[in-house]
Amino acid sequence: MADIRKKAKITVKESAFSWVGKDKLRRKASGDIFAVDEKAARIELRRQGMNVSRITKKSQSIFSERVQKIKPSDIAIFARQLATMLNAGVPVVQSIDIVGRGHENTSMRELLATLKMDVESGDSLTQALRKHPDHFDEMFCNLVEAGERAGVLESLLDKIAIYKEKSETMKKKIKKALTYPIAVVMIALIVTVVLLVFVVPVFEDLFKSFGADLPVFTKMVIEMSKWMQAYWWIIGAILVSVFYTVKFFIKTSEPFNYFIDKTLLKVSVVGEILNKSAIARFSRTLSTMSAAGVPLVEALESTAGTCGNRVYEAAVLQAREEVAVGQRLQYAIQESGLFPHMVQQMVEIGEESGSLDAMLSKVADFYEEEVDNLVDNLSSLMEPIIMVILGVLVGGLIVAMYLPIFKLGSAIH
């Protein structure tokens, strides 16, 4: 727990400002910038070498252009496009400008325009990227720095693009596998509540006119309906309170997040997917950084944050501390108890043969394929489970309402 270093971040709302002025060469320039206030916008523009003569806050209305969020997929596409441009011999500044101008996401265009100005003003690409840690993580920056030092920036950007693309593909598959069953179950619960609150009372009035004794199952459903009508607001208040309480602790409490991640790893099927996904990410990231020549201790620190699970993050950070004092990586990950024997053996072979990046790449390929198979199996497994849930919730209510009608029909005959 002590090794978990990330702290909760407070999100500050930024506004859009339009500005007019001159650049370092005394040429007229204008554009838009996002900042907390006008003062912050002026400071940032001055840092970029702009002499601002006028700056105004852009009005936000329902008709104004909506600020789009920068997604990990946008960063992956940027890495791929920049690598392609550099391979074609296009200079870095011009490459960033071309990619930025062609991007559909307005926030991404703004980010790339800032990167371009920083590089033009004398910063290295690594320095420019490090100013935006929310979008470019430590691994991204370290690999770019290694590429700039060795003069193989386009090659390492290509490795970053491959890594990001594989990572995003895996995330999408896992989300797709989990989103469908969760959505169906939520809809089933909503339909059940609607039936209990609005439909069952209508049948109850009809049954009272029969004058006959109702089946036990029907009586249970009617009592449940009465309870739901009387206390629905309490249930709603509890659900809303639980939702916002969990959301608050997720944003502010690292121990709570660690507990959630640890619990999820123990859940049947889902836990297996998360475990193998974390190992795949660890292997892919460390393989990419090792191939780039990043020192192992530094690579492990960057790799920790890409595992996608705080339990694995803490284990990798602990392994980093042990490697830093001379321990071999094989023994360092073995002590965590999280990495299978096969992973330990592949790491051992890689360390002894000097091909750690190649061995870790094979591990990543294996576990990515395992995750793909598990996600496909989960999708197949969830279909009958969903049918059972729908049958119990919705079908059970319908049967309960029709039992008295069947009973009445039998009495008439």
Image (spheres, rainbow, N blue to C red):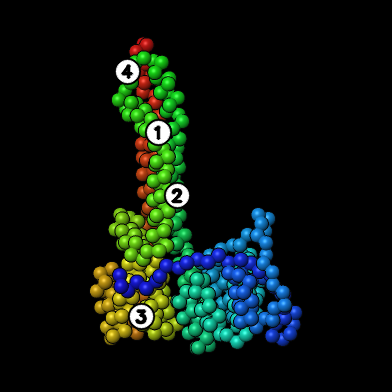
Q: Of marks 4 and 2, which one's residue comes earlier in the chain?
A: 2
- Residue position for label 1: 230
Q: Residue furthest bottom?
A: 150
Q: Is residue 51 left or right of residue 172?
A: right
Name which residue lies at 28% across and 86% down: 326
Is residue 111 visible in this depiction of the protein? yes
Who is closer to the viewer here, 113 or 26? Answer: 26
Q: Of the residues tagged 4 and 2, which is closer to the observer?
A: 4
Kind of residue at disc 1:
Ala
Task: Give the residue at mark 4.
Answer: 213
Q: Identify which amino acid the numbered label 4 is placed on.
A: Asp
Q: Would you say 160 lies left or right of 62 here?
A: left
Residue 319, picture quadrant: bottom left
| Mark 1 residue element | helix
Q: Quadrant of the C terminus?
A: top left
Residue 199 position, x and y percent, is 45, 29
